Amino acid sequence: MRLDENEPVFQRSKWGTNRYEYNPNNPVGLALIVLSVAFAAVMLILMHNHAGPFALPPDPTPASWSPPPDMSRWALPAGIPSTDPTPASSDSP
């Protein structure tokens, strides 16, 4: 195989489709092929080892117990009567 800088970086696919593929006869095309394969291999290794962007989230540390918040601040102020949420029934139709 002879590298020729006059060859195009992309060439038409030989399968009769309109797709283009990297041309291994061009140094840039060959470099793109090598980089694509290396990138795919690194990503597969990272996925297999659960590393990098594929790392599992860290286990949440159990928080120490804390009492529930004080709900007295949500109570009605003094002097305001509480109302019953159900309406009173009336005897008249």
Image (spheres, rainbow, N blue to C red):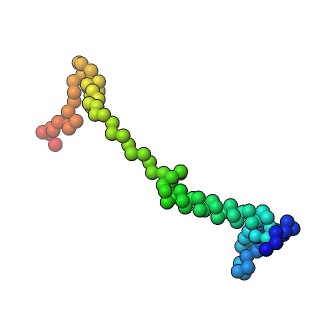
Residue 76 image point, x, y percent: 26, 24
In the rendered view, tell whether residue 83 sits above or below residue 40.
Answer: above
Most extreme residue toward the left is 91
Side (left or right) of 20 relative to 88: right
Residue 12 image point, x, y percent: 76, 74
- Looking at the rendered structure, the number of numbered marks drawn on it comes to 0
Q: Which corner quadrant of the image does residue 66 belong to?
A: top left
Image quadrant containing the N terminus: bottom right
Q: Which corner quadrant of the image does residue 26 belong to?
A: bottom right
Picture residue at 42% right of the left edge, 45% below the top: 58
Side (left or right) of 27 relative to 58: right
Q: Nearer the viewer, residue 53 or 91?
A: 53
Picture residue at 12% right of the left edge, 39% below the top: 91
Most extreme residue toward the front is 1
Residue 45 image point, x, y percent: 54, 59
Image quadrant containing the C terminus: top left
Residue 81 image point, x, y percent: 21, 24
Picture residue at 71% right of the left edge, 78% below the top: 17
Most extreme residue toward the bottom is 16
Picture residue at 64% right of the left edge, 64% below the top: 37
In the rendered view, tell whether residue 21 sits above or below residue 68.
Answer: below
Q: Nearer the viewer, residue 23 or 87?
A: 23
In the rendered view, tell whether residue 49 sits above or below residue 3.
Answer: above
Side (left or right) of 13 relative to 72: right
Most extreme residue toward the top is 79
Q: Nearer the viewer, residue 68 or 29?
A: 29
